[in-house]
Image (tube, rainbow, N blue to C red):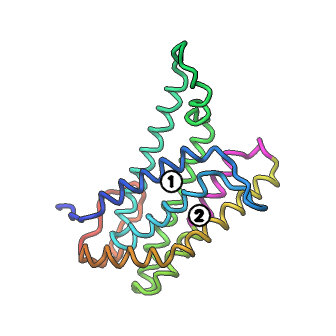
């Protein structure tokens, strides 16, 4: 069957991937904001969950699945290629190797942690969002966006911190990173709810669609988008 053609889906996926890549690049820095300790990625990465909510709400779970896999492959390619370029011998007269390595020398453990956490968290977010839309018959968007973020970010934050730092940092610090990051991400979603409402309404009117995932295969490895309605 012919896949549906949406006006803005490809553009939104491209922006989503750019935000995801940038968050990976700035994630190595740990920032101190009052009593909280946040990685650089946690200042930007929650935006990807807002994108995930928009994909699922407007275009259905299948669109979120496509965006998640696109972001996953792009992040994996960036990480692997970054490690390769850092490992190549620098020119003798080039003095930027140390600074370059600081940004692009992705530690394999961090790469694995971020990719696993991103993949699992985004799919939990999309699944909860889609199921809640069916349960609420499309009402209470605020409940769906916040509820899906509460679930997805919990999975993401725990996985990335435990896999990346378990055994290398004290568990007290790991726990601090988890709850600081998690609370910040959920607060991010709550604050952004009016913007999410606006973007969702504009896209639905522009695309002329209202999609429910009643017949959707929620297998992350399945293919296909929801049909236009």
Density class for disc 1 (Cα within 10 Å; few <14, some 14-19, many ≥20) is: some
Q: Which mark is residue 119?
A: 1
Density class for disc 2 (Cα within 10 Å; few <14, some 14-19, many ≥20) is: many
Question: Mark 1: which secondary structure?
Answer: helix
Report the residue that reaches farthest toward the top.
92
Closer-to-camera residue (2/200): 200
Residue found 65% across the figure and 65% down from its top? 184
Q: Quadrant of the N terminus?
A: bottom left
Q: Is residue 88 above or below residue 37?
A: above
Instruction: Kindly identify which residue carries mark 2.
Output: 153
Q: Is residue 41 above or below residue 64?
A: above
The quarter holding residue 164 reads top right
Residue found 61% across the figure and 69% down from its top? 186
The quarter holding residue 225 reads bottom left
Residue 63 position, x and y percent, is 35, 62
Residue 118 position, x and y percent, is 53, 54
Q: Is residue 99 magenta?
A: no
Residue found 55% across the figure and 12% down from its top? 92
Residue found 61% across the figure and 56% down from its top? 42
The quarter holding residue 6 reads bottom left
Residue 30 position, x and y percent, is 69, 49
**Left or right: 17 as drawn, with respect to 181:** left
Report the residue that reaches farthest toward the left.
2
Between disc 2 and disc 1, whose residue precedes? Answer: 1
Closer-to-camera residue (17/108): 17
Residue stretch rendered in magenta on the structure = 152-169
């Amino acid at each position: 069957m012919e896949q549906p053609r949406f006006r803005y889906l490809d553009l939104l996926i491209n922006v989503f991937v750019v935000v995801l890549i940038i968050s990976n690049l700035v994630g190595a820095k740990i920032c101190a904001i009052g009593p909280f300790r946040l990685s650089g990625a946690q200042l930007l990465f929650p935006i990807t969950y807002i994108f995930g909510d928009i994909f699922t709400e407007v275009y259905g779970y299948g669109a979120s699945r496509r965006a998640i896999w696109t972001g996953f492959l792009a992040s994996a390619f960036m990480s692997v290629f970054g490690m390769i370029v850092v490992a190549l011998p620098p020119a003798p007269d080039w003095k930027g190797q140390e600074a370059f390595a600081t940004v692009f020398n992705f530690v394999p453990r961090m790469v694995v942690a971020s990719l696993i956490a991103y993949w699992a968290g985004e799919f939990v977010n999309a699944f909860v969002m889609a199921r809640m839309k069916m349960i609420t018959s499309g009402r209470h968007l605020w409940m769906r966006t916040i509820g899906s973020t509460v679930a997805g970010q919990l999975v993401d934050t725990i996985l990335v911190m435990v896999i990346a730092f378990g055994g290398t940092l004290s568990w007290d610090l790991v726990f601090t990173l988890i709850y600081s990051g998690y609370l910040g991400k959920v607060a991010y979603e709550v604050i952004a709810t009016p913007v999410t409402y606006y973007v969702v309404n504009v896209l639905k009117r522009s695309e002329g669609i209202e999609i429910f995932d009643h017949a959707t295969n929620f297998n992350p490895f399945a293919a296909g988008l929801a049909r236009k309605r």
